[in-house]
Image (cartoon, rainbow, N blue to C red):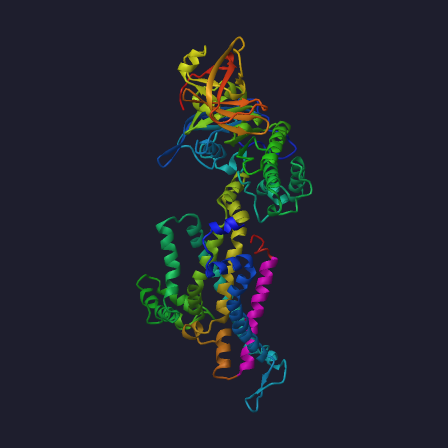
Amino acid sequence: MTVQAENRTPITALGRLSDFFHAHSRVLLGLLLSPPLLWLGVVYVGSLLALLAYSFFALDDFSGQIASQPTLATYGQLFERSNIDIILRTALMATAVTLTDAAIAFPIAYYAARYARGNQRAAFYIAVILPLWSSYLVRVYAWKLILAKEGIITWEAPHLGLGWLLDDILALPVIGGPSLSISYIGTFLVFCYMWLPYMILPTQAALERVPRNLVEAAGDLGATPAQAFRTVILPLALPGIVAGSIFTFSLTLGDYIIPQIVGNSIYFLGLAVYSQQGTAGNIPLAAALTVVPILIMSVYLTIARRLGAFDAL
Amino acid sequence: MRLAPFHCRLWKCGAPKVTDTQYAVSLDRISRVFGSVRAVDDVSLDIAVGQFFALLGPSGSGKTTCLRLIAGFEQPDTGHIRIFGDPVEGVPPYRRSVNTVFQDYALFPHMNVGDNVAYGLMVRGVARPEREAKAVQALAMVKLEGYGARKPSQLSGGQRQRVALARALVNKPKVLLLDEPLGALDLKLREQMQVELKALQQQVGITFIFVTHDQGEALSMADRVAIFNAGKIVQVGTPEDVYERPQSRFVADFVGSSNILTPDFAARAGGKPAWTSLRPEQILVLPAGSPPDGHASGEGIVQSVSYQGAVTRLTLDVEGMRIALNSPYKVRYQQGDRVRFHWPRAAMYPMPSDEL
């Protein structure tokens, strides 16, 4: 032992610290994890729980003050016709956006994961991520300009001989409107655009992890390319698509800016929460409305799990 | 390519019986070029029906590419491939009655073992009860009864290997391709699987073509061996042929690392003046006296001593040649010792080619 010690360079204080952490790796883990866990636990989950606690209070109709008596009355308000409409409308929109984004994202992600190499790959990442570098509001307003009655689509459609198509689309009941920027279609298009990168990236990552030789093995065992896709590629990519859909779905459920700027000013969940806790000053109802997307997401994830979306994880 | 009649692709029917064609697989002057590399370079090979055939060679010698050409994952740039007499140009893998056991098994991680094994039957539209019954039979054949409900991730390497075998064999292929089938297993398991694979092949009677870089594996399992070097086949023959009668210095060195005598040395030892192969196990240490009749002798300096359990391998420097021989286990030698040795002249095999 002494011989060894003599041959070694003297251990510095920093070295002793390294030795200590080497021997007690859990201490290091604790030190590294406690700040983010405190952040998540106290600041994030804590404030969320505080907000949710408000949902069990109610606004006193007379005084406009929050009565701090536990009650389910606020949850009862959720079942009023107007609120049910908001919830259904938002859930429908989120579903439509998610399905559309999945359909658009998959071929792009598939190409990027299986075919793109070198420069093409770099171009793919830039094309997908670049929009996220610019301001969210700028992009929403840009879409408002594109979709507006004075915008490029309305202006260009007759030149392309497609004026009739635009008119027909706008004439559709419910989802149509005076112009694309003042219709459900406009809101839908902007949602789809905004959340598309969040669907592409996880789908691409999942497809990338599907080993190429599994596809070869499927073909070797007699599966046509279509069968190999259905039985091997798609199931293995499903966790990625579900991860992406969690983004697109929950972001649509919570967003309150896009429906304000593009669309016919009809309430979606996020917008309803925004106005209840702001102008209306009804924090309990805002809190109760916040519970709705949490419940919807829980149900969605449970169904996804039941369907085996996470089996390949 | 004609597919076998539907009922023949199912389990009960036995190996496809083909009497009108001689070869299970024929390669006729095939080449496959990747960029500037001729991975397979003008290779011709006929593999008879029912054989256990080894493609042996160092890594990058083109043996795996050859296997992939037969499976249909690659198409040859030139040349023709026939499987049971049928040309397979442009025939995709899923239309070839050939199945592959992949090097890392390529089991589907999201399916249980039973579904993995039944996959080939499933994509061909075999009804569920029938394919499940066949999967159970196939698992029994590889001694994995009762493993059907497990996921591949819950199996050991050896068990995954067996699942991969069952998954391929359940389709009753005309030819089974195995890519380094035992490469990922530890030594003990590998030796056991060599015996089992051989027995399995004889049981099912299907032509097996397997790729390996392990000459011991090739010699112990195969009926015939094709030795690859730099995209070309340098020798085809039985294990005895390639081991005892190597046709080139490359084969002599690669298959069992034979001693290679220079033409000059061979001539002085009473052989032909040609590059000559002399197997280490033919050489004996000569502590004193003169060698027996019909034996030649030599002398060298010990370069290294390597204890290998059953034998101790000595490497000698003999006039600049490296000569390996097995020392009797009781005699201890050290580096730098001068050692005399002798060998039967008949054990020298002059090689027609000096190609390395």
Q: Is residue A58 left or right of residue B140?
A: left
Q: Nearer the viewer, residue A124 or B75?
A: A124
Above or below residue A262? Residue A223 is: above
Q: Could you tell me if residue B80 is visible in this image?
A: yes
User: Hey, which residue is sitting farthest right in the picture?
Assistant: B146
Above or below residue A227? Residue B247 is: above
User: Hey, which residue is sitting farthest left in the picture?
Assistant: A159
State which quarter of the image contains the C terminus of chain B.
Answer: top left
Q: Nearer the viewer, residue B162 or B280?
A: B280
Q: Could you tell me if residue B86 is visible in this image?
A: no
Above or below residue A137? Residue B202 is: above
User: Hey, which residue is sitting farthest bottom in the picture?
Assistant: A63
Q: Nearer the viewer, residue A231 or B150?
A: B150
Asked if the stretch drawn in magenta spans residue A302, the answer is yes
- What x and y, as percent, mark residue B303? 46, 26
Asked if the stretch drawn in magenta spans residue A202, the answer is no
Q: What residue lies at 44% left-to-right and 36% top-to-bottom?
A: B74
